[in-house]
């Protein structure tokens, strides 16, 4: 009795290329990055990072993958993943913008007050500008406090 032949498993097709994958092709010595995957996934556009060199509609069978971007994990495969929020990073960025904005405002108001003093304007005009500066500091403080409460 003849033994049944073992069926070889069909090789799994390679995963579809994704934007951001690092690849090599035979015509370029450097590592390239996928910038676009064309409809059907059988052709891609490539770009050499840090330059304007581009390759268009390169067949995926000519690609050698150097680095693959991990696929995004979602509970529902039909939706895109929710972006993660780093509250500390957001608050740090807001704080930086606040400090830069208030510093710039204070410097501009100081320059304007110095000019107005040379023009001999009434003291009430200069006091109004100082009040504006104080109002801005208070407004930023309130806004940052509200944002901190919302991000908790």
Image (cartoon, rainbow, N blue to C red):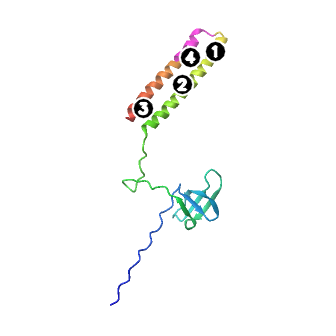
Residue farthest along the right direction in this orientation: 118
- Relative to residue 132, is residue 52 depicted above or below? below
What stretch of residues is rendered in magenta? 121-131
> Are discs 2 and 3 less than 8 Å apart at CB?
no
- Relative to residue 23, is residue 5 depicted above or below? below
- Whichever of labels 2 and 4 marks the residue nearer the N terminus, that label is 2
Q: Which residue is mark 4?
A: 129
Instruction: Name the image quarter holding residue 119.
Output: top right
Decide if residue 65 is on the left or right side of residue 4.
right
Q: CA distance from mark 3 to mark 1?
A: 35 Å
> Are discs 2 and 1 less than 8 Å apart at CB?
no
User: Is residue 23 rendered magenta in the image?
Assistant: no
The x and y percentages for residue 72 are: 43, 53
Checking the image for residue 147, the label placed there is: 3
> Are discs 1 and 4 less than 8 Å apart at CB?
no
The secondary structure making up most of the magenta span is helix
The x and y percentages for residue 3 are: 35, 86
**Crowding at label 4, few (<14), some or many (≥20) Cα neighbours within 10 Å?**
some
Quarter of the rendering occupied by the C terminus: top left
Secondary structure under badge 2? helix
- Relative to residue 84, is residue 12 depicted above or below? below
Checking the image for residue 102, the label placed there is: 2
- Whichever of labels 3 and 1 marks the residue nearer the N terminus, that label is 1
Could you tell me which residue is drawn at 47 percent across and 33 percent down? 92
- Whichever of labels 2 and 3 marks the residue nearer the N terminus, that label is 2
> Are discs 4 and 3 less than 8 Å apart at CB?
no
Q: CA distance from mark 2 to mark 4?
A: 14 Å
Which one is nearer the viewer's eye here, 13 or 138? 13
**Crowding at label 3, few (<14), some or many (≥20) Cα neighbours within 10 Å?**
some
Secondary structure under badge 4? helix
Could you tell me which residue is drawn at 39 percent across and 79 percent down? 7
Quarter of the rendering occupied by the N terminus: bottom left
């Amino acid at each position: 009795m003849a033994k049944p032949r073992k069926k070889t498993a069909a090789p799994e097709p390679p995963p579809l290329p994704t934007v951001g994958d690092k690849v090599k092709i035979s015509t370029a010595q450097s590592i390239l990055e996928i910038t676009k995957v064309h409809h059907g996934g059988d052709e891609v556009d490539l770009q050499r990072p840090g330059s304007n060199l581009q390759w268009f509609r390169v067949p995926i069978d000519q690609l050698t993958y150097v680095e693959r971007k991990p696929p995004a994990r979602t509970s529902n495969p039909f939706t895109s993943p929710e972006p993660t929020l780093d509250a500390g990073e957001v608050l740090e960025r807001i704080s930086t913008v606040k400090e830069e904005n208030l510093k710039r405002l204070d410097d501009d108001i100081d320059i304007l007050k110095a000019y107005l003093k040379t023009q001999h304007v009434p003291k009430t005009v200069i006091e109004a500008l100082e009040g504006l500066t104080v109002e801005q500091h208070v407004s930023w403080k309130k806004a940052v406090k509200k944002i901190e409460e919302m991000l908790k």
